[in-house]
Image: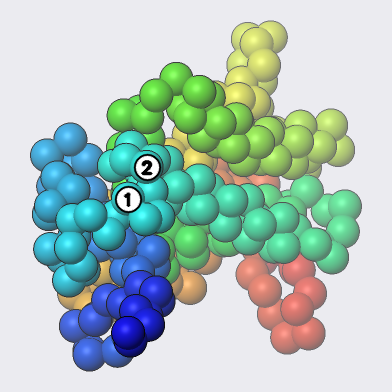
Amino acid sequence: MARRNSRRPAARTAEGRDTPPAEAIEAAAFDLFARQGFQVTTVRDVMRACGLTQGALYNHFSSKEELLATIIRSTQAALERELGAALTGIGDDPIAQLRAFVRAYTLRHTRKRVEAVVANREWEWLDAPRRQEIRASRRRVREMLVRILESGHAAGAFRALRRNGRDDVKIVAMAILNQCTDVAYWYNAAHDGWRAEDVADLHADLALRTVGAPPTRLRAGDTIAAE
Protein backbone atom coordinates (compact mmCIF):
# COMPACT_ATOMS: atom_id res chain seq x y z
CA MET A 1 0.00 0.00 0.00
CA ALA A 2 1.33 3.42 -0.92
CA ARG A 3 2.11 5.62 2.04
CA ARG A 4 0.07 8.81 2.21
CA ASN A 5 2.10 12.02 2.18
CA SER A 6 1.18 13.77 5.43
CA ARG A 7 2.62 17.15 4.43
CA ARG A 8 -0.14 19.75 4.19
CA PRO A 9 -0.32 21.40 0.74
CA ALA A 10 0.92 24.93 0.48
CA ALA A 11 -1.42 27.69 -0.64
CA ARG A 12 -0.88 29.36 -3.98
CA THR A 13 -0.40 33.11 -4.01
CA ALA A 14 -1.60 35.43 -6.77
CA GLU A 15 1.93 35.28 -8.21
CA GLY A 16 1.79 31.49 -8.28
CA ARG A 17 4.32 30.96 -5.48
CA ASP A 18 3.79 28.39 -2.75
CA THR A 19 3.15 29.88 0.69
CA PRO A 20 2.98 27.98 4.00
CA PRO A 21 -0.72 27.52 4.86
CA ALA A 22 -0.62 29.46 8.15
CA GLU A 23 1.03 32.44 6.44
CA ALA A 24 -1.47 32.34 3.59
CA ILE A 25 -4.39 32.24 6.01
CA GLU A 26 -3.02 35.16 8.02
CA ALA A 27 -2.41 37.26 4.90
CA ALA A 28 -5.93 36.61 3.62
CA ALA A 29 -7.40 37.41 7.02
CA PHE A 30 -5.52 40.71 7.25
CA ASP A 31 -6.82 41.75 3.84
CA LEU A 32 -10.43 40.73 4.43
CA PHE A 33 -10.65 42.03 8.00
CA ALA A 34 -9.26 45.37 6.82
CA ARG A 35 -11.61 45.66 3.83
CA GLN A 36 -14.87 44.35 5.26
CA GLY A 37 -14.40 43.86 8.99
CA PHE A 38 -13.94 40.89 11.28
CA GLN A 39 -17.62 40.29 12.01
CA VAL A 40 -18.71 40.26 8.37
CA THR A 41 -15.85 38.06 7.18
CA THR A 42 -16.48 34.32 7.43
CA VAL A 43 -14.04 31.44 7.68
CA ARG A 44 -15.17 30.42 4.21
CA ASP A 45 -14.27 33.88 2.88
CA VAL A 46 -10.76 33.60 4.32
CA MET A 47 -10.13 30.11 3.01
CA ARG A 48 -11.49 30.91 -0.44
CA ALA A 49 -9.19 33.95 -0.60
CA CYS A 50 -6.07 31.90 0.14
CA GLY A 51 -7.06 28.88 -1.97
CA LEU A 52 -7.39 26.35 0.86
CA THR A 53 -10.29 24.23 2.06
CA GLN A 54 -12.35 25.53 4.96
CA GLY A 55 -11.18 22.74 7.25
CA ALA A 56 -7.54 23.71 6.73
CA LEU A 57 -7.95 26.71 9.03
CA TYR A 58 -8.49 24.42 12.01
CA ASN A 59 -5.10 22.76 11.45
CA HIS A 60 -3.54 26.06 12.55
CA PHE A 61 -6.19 28.06 14.47
CA SER A 62 -8.96 26.83 16.73
CA SER A 63 -11.38 29.52 15.53
CA LYS A 64 -11.75 32.73 13.59
CA GLU A 65 -11.32 34.56 16.90
CA GLU A 66 -7.96 32.88 17.53
CA LEU A 67 -6.88 33.83 14.01
CA LEU A 68 -7.72 37.48 14.75
CA ALA A 69 -5.89 37.32 18.08
CA THR A 70 -2.82 35.76 16.46
CA ILE A 71 -2.44 38.36 13.72
CA ILE A 72 -3.05 41.31 16.04
CA ARG A 73 -0.64 39.89 18.62
CA SER A 74 2.08 39.52 15.98
CA THR A 75 1.48 43.05 14.72
CA GLN A 76 1.69 44.57 18.18
CA ALA A 77 4.85 42.61 18.99
CA ALA A 78 6.49 43.80 15.76
CA LEU A 79 5.56 47.41 16.56
CA GLU A 80 7.10 47.17 20.03
CA ARG A 81 10.29 45.66 18.59
CA GLU A 82 10.62 48.35 15.93
CA LEU A 83 10.11 51.17 18.42
CA GLY A 84 12.67 49.67 20.79
CA ALA A 85 15.16 49.28 17.95
CA ALA A 86 14.58 52.89 16.84
CA LEU A 87 15.51 54.15 20.31
CA THR A 88 18.59 51.97 20.64
CA GLY A 89 21.74 54.06 20.52
CA ILE A 90 19.87 57.38 20.41
CA GLY A 91 21.21 58.50 23.76
CA ASP A 92 19.54 60.66 26.41
CA ASP A 93 18.47 63.62 24.26
CA PRO A 94 14.64 63.67 24.51
CA ILE A 95 14.32 65.62 21.26
CA ALA A 96 16.24 62.94 19.38
CA GLN A 97 14.25 60.24 21.18
CA LEU A 98 10.91 61.80 20.28
CA ARG A 99 11.92 62.19 16.65
CA ALA A 100 13.14 58.56 16.46
CA PHE A 101 10.01 57.20 18.16
CA VAL A 102 7.54 59.14 16.00
CA ARG A 103 9.43 58.34 12.78
CA ALA A 104 9.45 54.62 13.57
CA TYR A 105 5.80 54.60 14.60
CA THR A 106 4.72 56.49 11.48
CA LEU A 107 6.85 54.37 9.14
CA ARG A 108 5.22 51.25 10.55
CA HIS A 109 1.81 52.72 9.73
CA THR A 110 2.80 53.59 6.17
CA ARG A 111 4.57 50.32 5.35
CA LYS A 112 2.16 47.96 7.14
CA ARG A 113 -1.10 49.79 6.55
CA VAL A 114 -3.39 46.76 6.36
CA GLU A 115 -1.95 45.22 9.50
CA ALA A 116 -2.22 48.54 11.33
CA VAL A 117 -5.86 49.04 10.35
CA VAL A 118 -6.82 45.57 11.58
CA ALA A 119 -4.84 45.88 14.82
CA ASN A 120 -6.30 49.29 15.67
CA ARG A 121 -9.88 48.75 14.51
CA GLU A 122 -10.73 45.09 15.09
CA TRP A 123 -9.02 44.26 18.40
CA GLU A 124 -12.13 45.04 20.44
CA TRP A 125 -13.88 42.01 18.92
CA LEU A 126 -11.54 39.77 20.91
CA ASP A 127 -12.67 38.10 24.12
CA ALA A 128 -11.78 39.74 27.43
CA PRO A 129 -8.47 37.93 28.15
CA ARG A 130 -7.17 38.55 24.64
CA ARG A 131 -8.31 42.17 24.70
CA GLN A 132 -6.42 42.59 27.94
CA GLU A 133 -3.26 41.18 26.33
CA ILE A 134 -3.49 43.59 23.40
CA ARG A 135 -4.40 46.47 25.70
CA ALA A 136 -1.24 45.77 27.71
CA SER A 137 0.86 45.99 24.54
CA ARG A 138 -0.80 49.25 23.52
CA ARG A 139 -0.17 50.60 27.01
CA ARG A 140 3.52 49.69 26.80
CA VAL A 141 3.80 51.60 23.54
CA ARG A 142 2.11 54.63 25.09
CA GLU A 143 4.33 54.46 28.17
CA MET A 144 7.43 54.47 25.97
CA LEU A 145 6.28 57.80 24.57
CA VAL A 146 5.18 59.13 27.98
CA ARG A 147 8.64 58.46 29.40
CA ILE A 148 10.22 60.43 26.54
CA LEU A 149 7.82 63.34 27.08
CA GLU A 150 8.35 63.36 30.84
CA SER A 151 12.13 63.30 30.35
CA GLY A 152 11.93 66.19 27.90
CA HIS A 153 9.69 68.19 30.20
CA ALA A 154 12.00 67.62 33.18
CA ALA A 155 14.99 68.73 31.09
CA GLY A 156 13.20 71.85 29.89
CA ALA A 157 13.26 70.69 26.25
CA PHE A 158 9.46 70.31 26.01
CA ARG A 159 7.33 73.20 27.15
CA ALA A 160 3.71 72.52 26.24
CA LEU A 161 2.96 69.67 28.66
CA ARG A 162 1.32 71.47 31.57
CA ARG A 163 -1.63 73.83 31.58
CA ASN A 164 -3.18 75.57 34.58
CA GLY A 165 -1.20 73.31 36.87
CA ARG A 166 -2.52 70.12 35.28
CA ASP A 167 -0.25 67.40 33.86
CA ASP A 168 -1.17 66.88 30.19
CA VAL A 169 1.55 64.35 29.33
CA LYS A 170 -0.75 61.37 28.70
CA ILE A 171 -3.17 63.47 26.67
CA VAL A 172 -0.31 64.80 24.56
CA ALA A 173 1.05 61.27 24.11
CA MET A 174 -2.34 60.00 22.92
CA ALA A 175 -2.71 62.96 20.54
CA ILE A 176 0.67 62.20 18.96
CA LEU A 177 -0.05 58.46 18.71
CA ASN A 178 -3.52 58.98 17.23
CA GLN A 179 -2.19 61.41 14.63
CA CYS A 180 0.44 58.88 13.53
CA THR A 181 -1.94 55.91 13.69
CA ASP A 182 -4.37 57.64 11.34
CA VAL A 183 -1.73 57.60 8.59
CA ALA A 184 -2.63 53.95 7.93
CA TYR A 185 -6.13 54.99 6.83
CA TRP A 186 -5.15 57.56 4.22
CA TYR A 187 -1.56 56.98 3.11
CA ASN A 188 -1.14 55.72 -0.45
CA ALA A 189 2.23 56.44 -2.03
CA ALA A 190 1.00 55.44 -5.50
CA HIS A 191 -1.73 58.12 -5.45
CA ASP A 192 -0.36 60.81 -3.17
CA GLY A 193 3.25 60.92 -4.32
CA TRP A 194 4.53 61.08 -0.74
CA ARG A 195 7.40 58.84 0.28
CA ALA A 196 6.92 57.01 3.57
CA GLU A 197 10.05 58.72 4.89
CA ASP A 198 8.64 62.15 4.05
CA VAL A 199 5.43 61.42 5.94
CA ALA A 200 7.44 60.13 8.91
CA ASP A 201 9.63 63.26 8.95
CA LEU A 202 6.58 65.52 8.80
CA HIS A 203 4.90 63.75 11.71
CA ALA A 204 8.09 63.91 13.75
CA ASP A 205 8.22 67.67 13.15
CA LEU A 206 4.56 68.00 14.12
CA ALA A 207 5.18 66.07 17.34
CA LEU A 208 8.10 68.30 18.22
CA ARG A 209 6.02 71.42 17.60
CA THR A 210 3.23 69.96 19.73
CA VAL A 211 5.53 69.82 22.74
CA GLY A 212 7.13 73.18 22.05
CA ALA A 213 10.49 71.83 20.89
CA PRO A 214 12.39 72.98 17.79
CA PRO A 215 11.99 70.66 14.77
CA THR A 216 15.11 68.64 13.95
CA ARG A 217 16.47 66.88 10.90
CA LEU A 218 18.83 63.98 10.47
CA ARG A 219 21.92 65.21 8.67
CA ALA A 220 25.16 63.75 7.43
CA GLY A 221 26.74 61.37 9.89
CA ASP A 222 23.37 60.57 11.54
CA THR A 223 23.73 63.43 14.02
CA ILE A 224 20.79 65.40 15.35
CA ALA A 225 20.80 69.17 14.92
CA ALA A 226 18.10 71.73 15.59
CA GLU A 227 17.00 73.77 12.63
With 137 as the anchor, is 6 left or right in this view? left
Q: Nearer the viewer, residue 161 or 182?
A: 182
Q: Is residue 24 visible?
A: yes
Asked if residue 155 lies left or right of residue 76, the reply is: right
The residue that mark 1 highlights is 58
Distance of mark 1 from mark 2, alpha carbons? 5 Å
The disc labelled 2 sits on which kind of residue? Ser
Residue occupying the point 69% across, 9% down: 165
Q: Which residue is mark 2?
A: 62
Which residue is depicted at the point 83% across and 53% down?
93
Q: Nearer the viewer, residue 75 or 63?
A: 63
Label 2 element class = loop
The residue type indicated by label 1 comes to Tyr
Choose between 57 and 178: the one closer to the eye.
Answer: 57
Quadrant into which the C terminus falls? bottom right
- Residue 9, placed above or below residue 216: below
Q: Is residue 99 visible?
A: no
Instruction: Kindly identify the residue that appears in the image at 33 percent across and 86 percent down.
Output: 2
Q: What residue is shown at x 59% (from left), y 37% (from top)? A: 137
Q: Are marks 1 and 2 in contact (CB under 8 Å)?
A: yes
Question: Where is residue 107 drawn, in percent x and y?
Answer: 49, 64
Is the residue 101 above or below the residue 226 in the image? above
